[in-house]
Amino acid sequence: MHRGAVCSYGLTVAVNVAEDDMAKKEEFVQSITKQSEDFSRWYIDVIVKADLIDYAPVRGCVVFKPDGYELWEACQRELDRRFKETGHRNAYFPLFIPESFFMKEKEHVEGFNPELPWVTEVGDEKLEERLAVRPTSETMVGHMYSQWIHSYRDLPLLINQWANVVRWEKRTLPFLRTSEFLWQEGHTAHATAEEALEETLRMLDVYVDFVETELAIPVFRGQKTPSEKFPGAVATYSIEAIMRDGKAVQAGTSHYMGQNFARSFNIQFLDRDNQRKFAYTTSWGLSTRIIGAMIMVHGDDRGLQIPPRIAPTQVIVVPIGPPKARERVVNAADEVVARLRKVGLRVRADAREDLSPGWKFNEYEMRGVPLRLELGPRDLDAGQAVLVRRDNGEKLAVALSDIEERATGLLEEIQKSMFERARAFREEHAKQAASLDDLRQAVREEHSFALAGWCGKDECEAKIKEETGATSRNIPFAPPAHPERCVVCNSPAAHVVWFGRAY
RNA sequence: CGGAAUGUAGCUCAGGUGGUAGAGCGCACGGUUCGGGACCGUGAGGUCGCAGGUUCGAAUCCUGUCAUUCCGACCA
């Protein structure tokens, strides 16, 4: 811990300074647990240090701080645009759901009952009927749709809701599983099964497009096995992402309900042929969990790494210089910020005088800002700025005259290379398993997904979970291979399934 | 919901066998600094998670409770 400053000749001083810098770098990095050391620890360290969330004094609940909430706002912005483009409109349904509504759909109530919080009294008075705090809104929406839909002319009904929901989870993890979370839930009603199924898959594709384009997370799309489907659905489809520790996160789901909820809630319409028919419904949801996935897919030992397209701050401008040069660099920085904003970039300058440039470099890397723009006296003399990429650390001296073009181009490149890196990782971590041992090896030792044949029996699926800790993720529409036998019982495979350990 | 660990200043933590609380970092003020987490000086800041109990006296011992982390069961 001794500085080398007392040394009297240049070479020694230089060596000691370099060692000192290394030591400091180490120290900084140590404040975030290394991914390889303890991935869970790393995750918690990063989200707290990057100021995304704070724990609330209620079990399993968190506060989204501005930097975390802005990530969700970016997701909302991009998703909402896609929902509108596909003909949906937003509405809002109540937070409280009468107990009797849950009784109407047997599978549904059984599925959610263990995690429902209930309102039983108001002031000193007991309520006549208990009210659940919604875990999802199918029942309330079903009830309302039964009153709104009378004719085939009322269909399709395409509504989305942005809301908070509550599921009292036994085990929580910020973003990935909290007792209360934010999400969107789409609810649609259609005249025919074909149309409803088409909607279900269309919205799954909207999720794929959103997650891959905006969040740079490659996903596996497919159908859930019966044991993993939504309570009350005929079929559930999902997109599954693989984290850097090899574990799976279900990034979005889309459900085809058939007429199940329509029958339970009496959603009927008079068709062209003057016959009363039950509608076909769908629902689809994507939650703040996706932010956890983004962190775990892109983050590294230096902290967060946010894809430019959703980054609340895309470019951080750091003016550098001693007090005499201060005014000059700060003015230049302001000008650069204004110019970049003009072309639509989200840019901020950090001109705080009490923090050194080095401190800011580390800080914004930890916070995942994709691009840093350094502006010092030497740069101004040369008519340039230094751009530094978060994804690969590359430094580029760029002429101020074409800063807009270069910054925009670099952000696009970063977005692309982040997706490519994640995709390469996914390819390396997608194995095939011909036996239960293979499967265990793949998910436990190789931290991967495993593609395996499955006969379709619940027992075999349960056995896989028991033996390997992996659950079925989904049944891909276009599997990369076609194993013919069930990995457990060796009878002919009815499906090809992705298995993985899940969050 | 079961097992384990933790809870003391904003953060990380130290406080043998009970005697009224400390460090580093951060924060505030002043000054010097500024191209990869700068430095000096001064200062503010804690009903020791909460509630009981034992005791003349509890951060310390006991009981309960709440929260967080990890493992397991349950669950998307």
Image (cartoon, coloured by chain):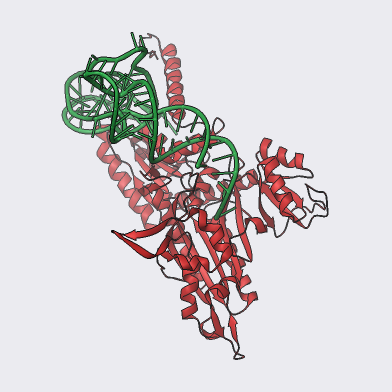
Which residue sits at x=80%, y=51%? A483
Vertical placement of residue A393 versus A134, above or below: above
Which residue sits at x=54%, y=64%? A284
> The chain shown in red is which?
A
Q: Quadrant of the C terminus of chain A?
A: top right
Vertical placement of residue B2 versus A346, above or below: above
Judge by depth and name the residue closer to the eye, A383 or A463: A463
Residue A294 in the image: state x and y as whole percent: 52, 48
- How many numbered discs, if any? 0
Is residue A50 visible to the viewer in this orientation of the structure?
no
Judged left or right of residue A235, residue A405 is left
Judged left or right of residue A297, residue B12 is left
Chain B palette colour: green
Vertical placement of residue A260 versus A383, above or below: below
Which residue sits at x=48%, y=73%? A143
Q: Quadrant of the N terminus of chain A?
A: top left
Is residue A135 visible to the viewer in this orientation of the structure?
yes
Which residue sits at x=41%, y=68%? A92
Judge by depth and name the residue closer to the eye, A137 or A191: A137
Residue A440 in the image: state x and y as whole percent: 71, 39
Residue A48 in the image: state x and y as whole percent: 41, 39
